[in-house]
Amino acid sequence: MKFVIDKNILLEALTNVSRAIGTRTTIPILNGIKFDLSNDSLSLFASDSELSIRIKIEEKNIKKIEKTGSIIISSKYILDIIRKMPSDIINFELEENNKIHIYTDNNEYVLNCYDLNDYPNIAIDESKEPIVLKDELLKSMINETSYAVSTQEARLLFTGVNLKIAGDSLECIATDSYRLAKKSIKLDNIITNAINIIIPARSINELEKMLTTDGEDVIIHVFNNKIMFKYKNIEFQTNLLSGQYPDTNHFIPSEFAYIINLDLKQFNDAVDRASLLAQSKEKNIVRVEVNDKLMTISSSASEIGTTDEKIAIECNNKERLDIAFSSRYMLEALKVIKDNNILLLMNGDDKPILIKSVDDESLIELILPVKTY
């Protein structure tokens, strides 16, 4: 193997492919990145056996290919080495005894590499009926839901995002049982076979970091135990979580006693300010009082003090309502809404709070209130 490549092109590919390197792998060789150089491309591959990423750099983006070959280089060092190389043009040459020589005009590294024969055979597959989404839509869908997944591994199914497809209807759902986010979209094509899978949050969040908003297609291949996303020069494959995701539809009320229309930024900022005095309390609880056209947002901490703030609202119900919730959960829900006005939909101090955009029916967010007595 011998080739010359532009530093920035290689660095971008290495940054993305290294997202598949696990922090707790028990197989040493999976800490390496596999380089496969052919006459028409350089392919980089990394996997922790759960998540696998392959990135192909076409011949036109490689300065020179002198000799093809394959090698596995430790990810621990290669990314930092390339990032800190002083030259924009970098040379790679495979030497005897499984060593890779990486050099520019003024500096060089010689690294010991893993034995190529020890690397497991991990296939990246394509299905017969792929799903196609635009990159900006998929990126937005992940952002709007994945924040609500559970971080508790004891509740394994809730540590993933539930993807459901029936016909031309796609739903993306995440919950930790205290809050929920659900995004619904219509597909351009009807999918023959119904899909109901759970994608690990770590995988879906790493994918989101690689997506841009260029209007490019993401081609999605779904299998019984894995899913593969093909995007630009990237193939991103992850295992799925095993099990049946709970039906969350019955958690979402369809009728509401209180329908409150208010300015998102004004409400967000008021909750944020109230949370300053709630930080020492579990879950950062703030209280909201709704009284006709006025909302009062307050919090208190015995060792610090109290705060309250009033904002004008539009409400269909003149009866007074007191309710408390986690300010962190509320702020994280508000963060993903892009419109200026929102609806808070409620049925009482012990029933779920729904947060929706006035103009976008595709996203529903829910948080449970907190009893303060």
Image (cartoon, rainbow, N blue to C red):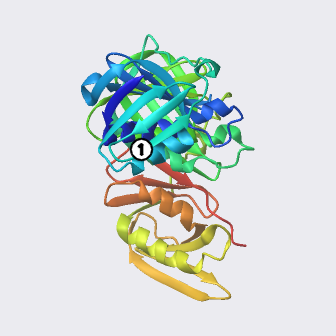
> Could you say which quadrant of the image residue 28 lies in?
top right
Residue 352, image x, y percentages: 58, 55
**Is 84 or 355 nearer to us in this picture?**
84
Q: How many marks?
A: 1
Residue 16, image x, y percentages: 44, 39
> Could you say which quadrant of the image residue 259 lies in?
bottom left
Q: Is residue 306 above or below residue 104?
A: below
Q: Residue at x 63, y 53 (%)?
A: 178
**Is 307 or 148 nearer to us in this picture?**
148
Q: Is residue 95 above or below residue 106?
A: above
Q: Is residue 262 above or below residue 118?
A: below
Q: The disc labelled 1 sits on which kind of residue?
A: Ile
Name the side, left or right, on which 207 lies relative to 4.
right
Image quarter where the N terminus lies is top left
Seen from this angle, which residue lies furthest top? 128
- Please, what secondary structure does the residue beneath circle 1 have? helix
Residue 312, image x, y percentages: 37, 75
Report whether residue 150 is seen. Answer: yes
**Is 133 or 324 nearer to us in this picture?**
133
Crowd rating for badge 1 (residues with CA inside 10 Å; few <14, some 14–19, many 20+): some
Image quarter where the C terminus lies is bottom right
Residue 324, image x, y percentages: 60, 69
Q: Which residue is mark 1?
A: 82
Seen from this angle, which residue lies furthest right? 154
Q: Residue at x 59, y 17 (%)?
A: 121
Q: Residue at x 75, y 44 (%)?
A: 154
Q: Residue at x 64, y 41 (%)?
A: 158
Report whether residue 141 is seen. Answer: no
